[in-house]
Image (cartoon, rainbow, N blue to C red):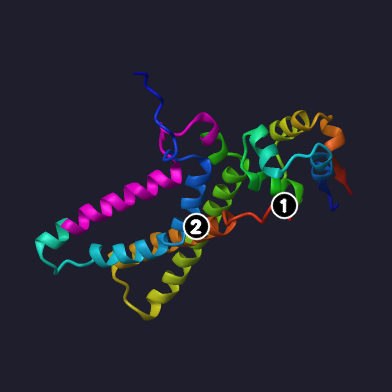
Amino acid sequence: MNERLSNRLKERRTELGLTQSELAELCLVSRKTINTVENGVFVPSTLLALKLAEALGVSVERLFWIER
Amino acid sequence: MSYRPRPEFDQPNAETVQRTRRTFLWFIPLIILQQGTVIFGHGSARSSQIVGTVAWACVSLAIIWLLLGLPMRWLSERDQAILNDEWNREIRGDAALWGMTALALIGCGMMLARIWVQLDFGLAIYSLVNGALIVAVLRYAWLNRAEPGEDE
């Protein structure tokens, strides 16, 4: 089964007018991490997913979902 | 007269360390190759051997310091967190895996090569270990390359 993690990180981030660097700063990670998560290259840990959701003011389920 | 805090213009942070890493990593294979010429230069004068040893000890320490981010007390917690974030840990693991694979493959290559050629023990070990190290370093450097611009 081909499953992958999709996200609406970019959509939500731009809604809030945040740049990748600003979001990275909020979550204490590098911009590359944000960039790779947004592009689906890197699957974040639960901890980072929760931090991202918190920083973007949405629930983690709204931010990430499994695409089958 | 009041004292003002020293401006922190020269203090490194996560971004500058990351930038240095990116540039410096590509030179490590060259450094390793050059190191070999000192290690196996038995015939050279004692003074040059001592200078070479001291020089390479310094270079090796600098590499370890840069890569592992040894207790860089001068970096803030924020900078340390960014330098050791999830993506960095992920690519370090990936690079280590490539290094181990290279070690196995080079070892197999040497096992085959010894059928036809008599290998020098020291040189073989040096090539085996550093071959794997170079592969790991190059893989890390590739994965750690600069990210595209914002929103690309």
For the question of whether residue B39 can be seen, the reply is: yes
User: Vertical placement of A59 versus B44: above or below?
Assistant: above
Q: Residue at x 54, y 54 (%)?
A: B95
User: Residue furthest toward the left?
Assistant: B46
User: Residue furthest toward the right?
Assistant: A68
Position of residue B101 measured from the top left corner of the image (x, y, whole percent): 53, 59
Position of residue B102 measured from the top left corner of the image (x, y, whole percent): 50, 62
User: Residue furthest toward the top?
Assistant: B1
Kind of residue indicated by mark 1: Val
Q: Residues within 10 Å of mark 2 (few under 14, many from 20)?
A: many
Q: Which residue is mark 2?
A: B136
Q: Is residue B135 left or right of residue A62?
A: left
Residue B70 magenta-highlighted:
yes
Q: Which residue is mark 1?
A: A41
Question: In front here: B37 or B127?
Answer: B37
User: Vertical placement of A9 versus B57: above or below?
Assistant: above
Q: Are marks 2 and 1 in contact (CB under 8 Å)?
A: no
Q: Residue at x 51, y 48 (%)?
A: B18
Q: Residues within 10 Å of mark 1 (few under 14, many from 20)?
A: few
- Chain letter of disc 1? A
Where, by quadrant of the figure, is residue A66 drawn? top right
Range drawn in magenta: B51-79
For the question of whether residue A42 can be seen, the reply is: no
Position of residue B62 measured from the top left corner of the image (x, y, whole percent): 35, 48
User: What is the spatial separation of the Cα atoms under label 2 and label 1, in whole angstroms?
Assistant: 20 Å
Q: Residue at x 35, y 62 (%)?
A: B31
Where, by quadrant of the figure, is residue B73 drawn? top left
Q: Is residue A12 left or right of residue B15?
A: right
- Chain letter of disc 2? B
Question: In front here: B135 or A21?
Answer: A21
